[in-house]
Image: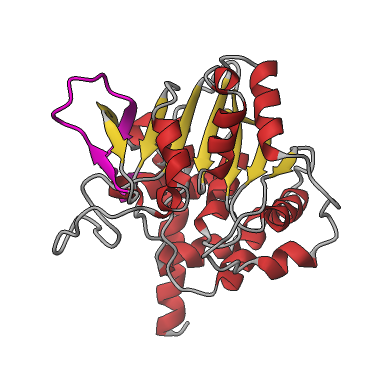
Amino acid sequence: MSKSAAILTSVLASLTIIASPLCAGQSSTLPAVPEKVIIDTDIGDDIDDAFALALALRSPELQIIGITTTFGDAETRAKLVDRFLAEVGRPDIPVAAGAPTASRGTFTQRRYAEGGHDAKPSHPDAVAFVLEQIRRYPGQVTLIAIGPLMNVGAAIDKDAATFRKLKRVVMMGGSIKRGYGDLGFGPPRPPQPEWNILNDIPSAQKLFASGVPLFVMPLDSTQLKLDEVKRTFLFSQGTPLTDSLTLLYHQWGQETPTLFDPMTIAFLVNPALCPVQPMRIRVDEKGFTRADLSSPSAPNAQVCLDSGPDSFFHFLLPRLVP
């Protein structure tokens, strides 16, 4: 055996150990009733949305009652979800599309969305779908918001009373103490307007003022790098799920993904992975999410400011492989 082959064999063997459920820090018992969730996503630009969806599909603690798409060409994003769900054997999950909007992003995975044979010719309206599910299951639905908040703001505008009957919203968004590129070592980088907030500031302001229990995973706790060793392990599995992720990764066209969005799913399944603290957050006119430490007002969010990358990936990898 060559030296390079021996090294790869050793790496894959060590990651197989990492992926063992005994090493994952997961509970051996599942909740009696899975938590009903709707995932609102801008899948198709960055790659982390696909990983979040994959993690949710591999988490029996969650019952995905629907997936809604938001931002830009939301209809084609819905077609991407159609294909992904079909290829992993879950075409039963309803998919709804938000209204089209202007987009500054790049739909990197459009070829995947348009290249399959499983896409539906059209999709129901995302806002109407979300409100319908809340009415059907008042106090039971968790909305997972991992994209710009157009659908969220529109739902609040259309029927704020129904929106308040959500169990909670868990979102990836904001930047409290750390900006993009601040991984907890090296020179600190100050907070910045984060993408999901910045692309619809009024909707973000409405959400933080809505009174719905809100759990926030900002840049501070979500800059989690899927390095080459982990990618090699994951993409070599050859399952429908990992093959779909591999194809989407290559269409994304960059090297090392930052898995911002999957932390929302990880938090729902194992809250210890991203401990939260109560805070009063104000979204200003430039899209900054500012912690109002001087205000006597009650907290409007539970915010996770730190997470452990090792613990996160010990959780993630066993979920995504057989």
The residue closer to the viewer here, 85 or 142, is 142
* Quarter assignment of residue 36: top right
Q: Position of residue 272 (x, y in %)?
A: 34, 31
| 130 w.r.t. 220: above or below | above
Asked if residue 22 can be seen in this view, the reply is no
Q: Say which residue appears at 77% left-offset and 65% top-offset.
A: 114
**245 in the magenta segment:** no
| 219 w.r.t. 280: above or below | below
Q: Is residue 76 left or right of residue 142?
A: right
Q: Say which residue appears at 58% left-offset and 54% top-offset.
A: 50
Q: Position of residue 178 (x, y in %)?
A: 23, 52
Asked if residue 13 can be seen in this view, the reply is yes
Q: Say which residue appears at 24% left-offset and 59% top-offset.
A: 182
Magenta stretch? 288-311
Outermost residue on the bottom side: it is: 2
The residue closer to the viewer here, 47 or 28, is 47
Q: Position of residue 20 (x, y in %)?
A: 47, 45
The residue closer to the viewer here, 17 or 288, is 288
Q: Is residue 206 left or right of residue 107?
A: left
* Quarter assignment of residue 58: top right
Q: Position of residue 61 (x, y in %)?
A: 56, 28
**310 in the magenta segment:** yes
Q: Is residue 16 left or right of residue 33?
A: left
In this rendering, the count of numbered labels is 0
* Colour scheme of the rendered structure: secondary structure
